[in-house]
Amino acid sequence: MGEGNAEYGRKKFKRSRSHFADRITADGADGWPVEPGRYRLVVSRACPWASRAVISRRLLGLEDAVSLAVTDPIQDDRSWRFTLDPDDRDPVLGIRFLHEAYDRRERDYPGGVSVPAIVDVPSGKLVTNDFQQITLDLATEWTAHHREGAPDLYPEPLRAEIDEVMEGVYRDVNNGVYRAGFATTQADYEEACRAVFDRLERLAGRLERRRYLVGDTVTEADIRLFTTLVRFDPVYHGHFKCNLWKLAENPVLWAYARDLYQTPGFGDTVDFDHIKRHYYVVHQGINPTQVVPLGPDLSAWLIPHHREQLGGRPFGDGTPPGPVPRGEEVPPSGRP
């Protein structure tokens, strides 16, 4: 990571663009053709950007086509670590740190070592860390390997509307909480924090009479909003000072988030233990004591949401994904 964990929150926040923006496509235009078993998706369950890819992969049934590597939620100055695996090495890639796959692709790359990352297993080289594009390609380029009954997460007739909704969600919510949390001046913090809650209020208005953000089924837009909402009260409300109100205090967004959490493919990928330990331990510039709070009470995520009264079908004409594959289950410490 270069400057180390102690730098988090001590300098003005600016999100790096994904330096490695190659795409894995059906036609292999970038030199990386869709090929089951060839690629490994490296994620941290703590990271909202990586969690998008975990949810998409599960909803689409790509578990057998693209293998999954889960890093330790606490990275050190050498990048994300595979210390959850035997011998502290990823069993497929044989590496101890994600930066090794980056280094095999290119030396002295800008932007640091981020997740999600897709690695080419035969060469051990990073293919892409383009978090904005990875999930879209899983939905549109890997269709030949989707499970039977997989939902269409990026339906062509709705793409313009989905893109418009996602742009505001990204700027003000997904990225906005980080701008607030890592702000180094009062003015920067207040501007970012107000933008977060202004956008959340508008989203609540949109979701008051409709079950999902766009159309009547789950789409990419819902995945992207969910990964921030599920972290809101555990980390963004306190740790990132986004505390005008809690998610649990907004009836519409709280019910919407619970609806998604209780939908197969969403909540069964969430590890609250990883989330809390990553933010509170790694961001030493914000939380130098590295003390991890006990709350909030997670049992409320299982309370009935009653959003089905709005209609809508999460998977459209499709079906829910099956059980979580063996070895990919979230341990009891991370669940309500």
Image (cartoon, rainbow, N blue to C red):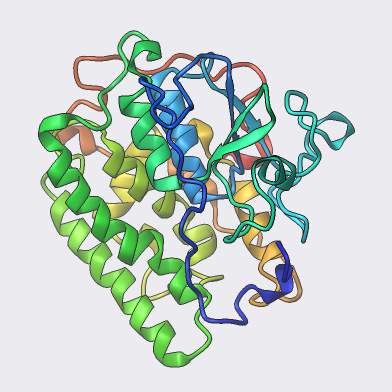
Kindly identify the residue that appears in the image at 61 percent across and 44 percent down: 44
Asked whether, in this view, residue 85 is left or right of residue 160, the answer is right
| Residue 261 location, quadrant | top left
Asked whether, in this view, residue 147 is left or right of residue 235, the answer is left
Kindly identify the residue that appears in the image at 48 percent across and 26 percent down: 32
Q: Quadrant of the C terminus?
A: top right
Q: Quadrant of the N terminus?
A: bottom right
| Residue 330 location, quadrant | top right
Where is residue 79 drawn, in percent x and y? Answer: 72, 53
Q: Is residue 264 above or below residue 65?
A: below
Q: Is residue 103 above or below residue 8?
A: above
Where is residue 225 drawn, in percent x and y? Answer: 34, 50
Kindly identify the residue that appears in the image at 45 percent across and 27 percent down: 57
| Residue 142 location, quadrant | top left
Of residues 45 and 230, the one drawn nearer to the viewer in this rendering: 45
Kindly identify the residue that appears in the image at 54 percent across and 20 percent down: 324
Of residues 145 and 58, the one drawn nearer to the viewer in this rendering: 145
